[in-house]
């Protein structure tokens, strides 16, 4: 029987799902700061969204992504709010891949990351181009100006700017999430609706009495 | 009504095909008494408490259970499949996760359980005020829970349990993070709580249990190895020396070999 | 003059859409009006000292970025009148206008959102969402996120220090630092999962699963009613959207 979106969402956040989604939203907001502290040139602002998509499901991942952007707007860059559709795309697509087992095979993970990055660039380009004329108050705005100066349209320039960073960032995110989930013992994985979306690390599968 | 607890032949495993975490548990706890579950880490104490609270049956849908549990006049075959709130109050081992994390003041935090019960207005205010004064928290009513010390957090967590007037208290290692003064307060609290509730607590040591418990249950590996009253427990204590830390016991023994067992315990706690 | 959360939200939506329609000089005037309103209208004043400071810092930052972007666009784009500047560069009128148009639009949007989020705390937003009919689990998730946002930096710092003490390569070359990043992320996520499991049990043990609405300051907000002010802003926003669509087709 087809479940309604509300029912599916309730199933995804049942039990440990709800607090974990809240943690992942906070992770979206702070993972980038951690990367900066380690002087790594990556954003990882969708790390939490991808984690939720894999372990819980697409609907809770969409919620995590949108809430991240709302809170990101509230705490720092107001522009983030308008890129919520990009987070919706990330949550939905990653959830779709996870359900089809793409996070169970290591060689599919980077392919999925690249595809996700291209999709994210496609989704963010119209928003950045038509709403903000390519200016998003970030260092990458210079890239947009450069692409425009060599003859591309605004939309093309913004898309190329996205293509220069999103596939790399999303591939790293996917690989990190795969490695993180792979290091979780079965008893923890099975507390989440999407626990079967990741490979089981047999060496870690010991039960314990609480 | 203050319930008795009767557990018959309880077996439980979290997932099929994995080792059983509770094996052949048989336990009878009288109404208004305090039973202490003792044993090392991994003995199954927390699991048993959580099974009784209903949270295991509610959250672990893959769990396999056999046996029967009777709490008061409610019978569960084999275990409660829903959380038995508000009849049961459960104090978690880590009190920092006990609090909701969303309330801005201690008073609102105490009222969280009442909100979930739909208790509003004067009754809500009355219960919150009573809990604040009983646990000496009135001066902290408007403080943010994130700014509480460990001992204050413990008091708030306990108070938040009791606002819903549970008749069964399940306390998971209630003194593990407390200093000796706070432990003394916990002893007083449990002695008075027994008037209106049945208490089951877990501990990995014996000192606290000796001060408050009427029934002593020694567990290891998911099984009950011993059940008995205080005297029976003390007489059998040497059998469990490998399971229970008795460093304080050694200290007491070395100080006075001529004193009786009960006097030694009295001396420790006065 | 007091505005509730719904009215502020609909006003913010209207201002954002207005920023897309108006020319740059009207947007500049709008920014000035918003800054004056911030000081004179109690409902949109920042709710705390911290928020006031954040508003000042962020609005100053955005202003500087807008000025820089305007100049850069003027330097790199060609067309229309060109003005020579020292250093052998020239600034084009087309570039400047483009920069001013996008910059002022961004400034209005940023200022509107800063005013909204600065004067409305997240718990108030959550209360509004609940009264608007959002499921209580969504509202709980939003509020619980604040708890994690507060505690996460300390946890990260603790794990960072612990891993560095164990010899994790957090200050070496980039490859090593990437490995160090994972060594910090892994225990962080693991501890978060364990905490999530415990928190979910604690919430259920305190009766949260019953689905009763959350209270704020002891009150459960009544179902929200749209006020005249909100309705007016929403109607104006609707007309703005129509105008934008019309302009887009005409292009």
Image (tube, rainbow, N blue to C red):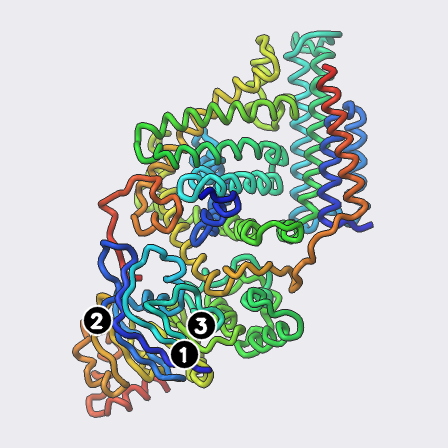
Q: Nearer the viewer, residue A41 or A5?
A: A5
Q: Position of residue B89 (x, y in %)?
A: 45, 71
Label 3: chain?
Answer: B
Q: Is residue B8 left or right of residue B151?
A: left
Image quarter of the C terminus of chain A: bottom left
C183 relative to A161, above or below: below
Same-subunit check for callouts 3 and 2: yes
Q: Nearer the viewer, residue C45 or A186?
A: A186
Return the residue found at the far left: B239
Q: Which type of secondary structure does the marked residue at label 3 adopt?
A: strand
Q: Which type of secondary structure does the marked residue at label 1 adopt?
A: loop
Give the residue drawn at x 62%, y 72%.
B124
Residue B110 visible in the picture: no
Instruction: Rate crowding at label 2 as few (under 14), some (14 to 19) or many (20 or more) other CA atoms within 10 Å.
Output: some
Between label 3 and label 1, give the one nearer the viewer.
1
Q: Which residue is the site of mark 1?
A: B73
Q: Is residue B53 left or right of residue A92?
A: left
Q: Position of residue A201 (x, y in %)?
A: 26, 43
Q: Are marks 3 and 1 in contact (CB under 8 Å)?
A: no
Q: Which residue is the site of mark 3?
A: B88
- Tell me the CA gap for discs 3 and 1: 14 Å
Give the residue drawn at x 30%, y 58%.
B14
Residue A125 visible in the picture: yes
Mark 1 vs mark 2: which is more N-terminal? 1
Instruction: Rate crowding at label 1 as few (under 14), some (14 to 19) or many (20 or more) other CA atoms within 10 Å.
Output: few
Q: Which residue is the site of mark 2?
A: B243
Q: Which type of secondary structure does the marked residue at label 2 adopt?
A: loop
């Amino acid at each position: 029987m087809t479940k309604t979106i509300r029912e599916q969402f309730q199933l995804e956040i049942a039990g440990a799902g709800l607090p974990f989604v809240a943690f992942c939203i906070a992770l979206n907001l702070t993972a980038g700061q951690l990367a900066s502290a380690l002087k790594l040139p990556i954003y990882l602002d969708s790390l939490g969204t991808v984690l939720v998509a894999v372990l819980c499901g697409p609907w809770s991942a969409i919620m995590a992504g949108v809430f991240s952007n709302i809170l990101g707007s509230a705490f720092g860059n107001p522009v983030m709010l308008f890129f919520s559709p990009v987070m919706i795309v990330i949550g939905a697509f990653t959830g779709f891949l996870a359900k089809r087992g793409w996070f169970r095979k290591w060689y599919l993970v980077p392919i999925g990351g690249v595809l996700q990055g291209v999709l994210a660039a496609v989704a963010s380009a119209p928003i950045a181009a038509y709403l903000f004329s390519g200016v998003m108050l970030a260092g990458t705005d210079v890239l947009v100006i450069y692409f425009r100066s060599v003859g591309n349209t605004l939309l093309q320039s913004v898309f190329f700017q996205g293509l220069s960073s999103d596939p790399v960032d999303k591939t790293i995110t996917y690989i990190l999430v795969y490695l993180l989930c792979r290091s979780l013992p079965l008893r923890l994985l099975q507390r989440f609706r999407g626990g079967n979306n990741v490979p089981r690390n047999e060496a870690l599968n010991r039960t314990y009495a609480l | 009504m203050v319930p008795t607890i009767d557990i018959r032949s309880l077996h439980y495993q979290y997932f099929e095909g994995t080792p059983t975490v509770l094996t052949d548990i048989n336990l009878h706890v009288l109404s208004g008494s305090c039973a202490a579950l003792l044993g090392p880490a991994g003995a199954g104490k927390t699991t048993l408490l959580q099974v009784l609270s209903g949270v295991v049956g509610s959250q672990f849908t893959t769990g396999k259970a056999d046996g029967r549990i009777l709490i008061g006049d409610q019978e569960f075959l084999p275990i409660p499949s829903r959380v038995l709130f508000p009849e049961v109050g459960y104090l978690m081992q880590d009190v920092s996760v006990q609090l909701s994390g969303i309330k801005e003041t201690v008073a609102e935090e105490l009222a969280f359980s009442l909100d979930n019960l739909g208790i509003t207005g004067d009754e809500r205010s009355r219960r919150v005020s009573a809990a604040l004064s009983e646990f000496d928290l009135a001066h902290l009513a408007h403080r943010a829970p994130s700014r509480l010390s460990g001992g204050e957090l413990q008091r708030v967590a306990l108070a938040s349990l009791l606002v819903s007037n549970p008749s069964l208290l399940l306390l998971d290692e209630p003194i593990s993070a407390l200093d000796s003064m706070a432990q003394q307060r916990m002893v007083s609290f449990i002695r008075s709580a027994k008037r209106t509730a049945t208490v089951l607590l877990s501990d990995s040591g014996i000192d606290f249990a000796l001060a408050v418990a009427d029934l002593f249950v020694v567990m290891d590996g998911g099984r009950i190895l011993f059940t008995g009253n205080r005297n029976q427990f003390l007489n059998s204590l040497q059998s469990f020396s490998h399971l229970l830390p008795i460093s304080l016991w050694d200290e007491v023994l070395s100080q006075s070999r001529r004193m009786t067992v009960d006097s030694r315990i009295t001396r420790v706690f006065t | 003059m007091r505005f509730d959360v719904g009215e502020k939200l609909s006003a913010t939506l209207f201002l954002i859409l207005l920023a897309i329609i108006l020319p740059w000089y009207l947007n500049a005037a709008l920014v000035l009006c918003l800054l004056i309103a911030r000081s004179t209208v109690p409902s949109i004043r920042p709710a705390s000292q911290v928020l006031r400071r954040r508003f000042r810092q962020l609005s100053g930052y955005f202003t500087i970025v807008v000025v820089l972007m305007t100049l850069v666009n003027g330097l790199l784009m060609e067309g229309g009148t060109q003005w020579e500047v020292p250093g052998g560069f020239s600034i084009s009128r087309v570039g400047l206008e483009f920069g001013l148009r996008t910059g002022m639009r961004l400034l209005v949007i940023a200022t509107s959102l800063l005013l909204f989020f600065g004067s409305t705390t997240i718990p108030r937003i959550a209360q509004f969402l609940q009264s608007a009919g959002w499921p209580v689990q969504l509202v709980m998730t939003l509020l619980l996120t604040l708890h994690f946002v507060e505690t996460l930096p300390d946890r990260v710092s603790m794990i960072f220090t612990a891993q560095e003490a164990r010899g994790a390569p957090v200050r070496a070359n980039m490859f090593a630092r990437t490995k160090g990043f994972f060594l910090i992320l892994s225990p962080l996520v693991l501890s978060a999962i364990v905490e999530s499991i415990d928190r979910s049990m604690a919430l259920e043990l305190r009766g949260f699963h019953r689905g009763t609405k959350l209270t704020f300051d002891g009150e459960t907000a009544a179902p929200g009613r749209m006020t005249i002010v909100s309705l007016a802003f929403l109607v104006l926003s609707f007309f703005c959207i129509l105008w934008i669509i019309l302009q887009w087709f005409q292009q």
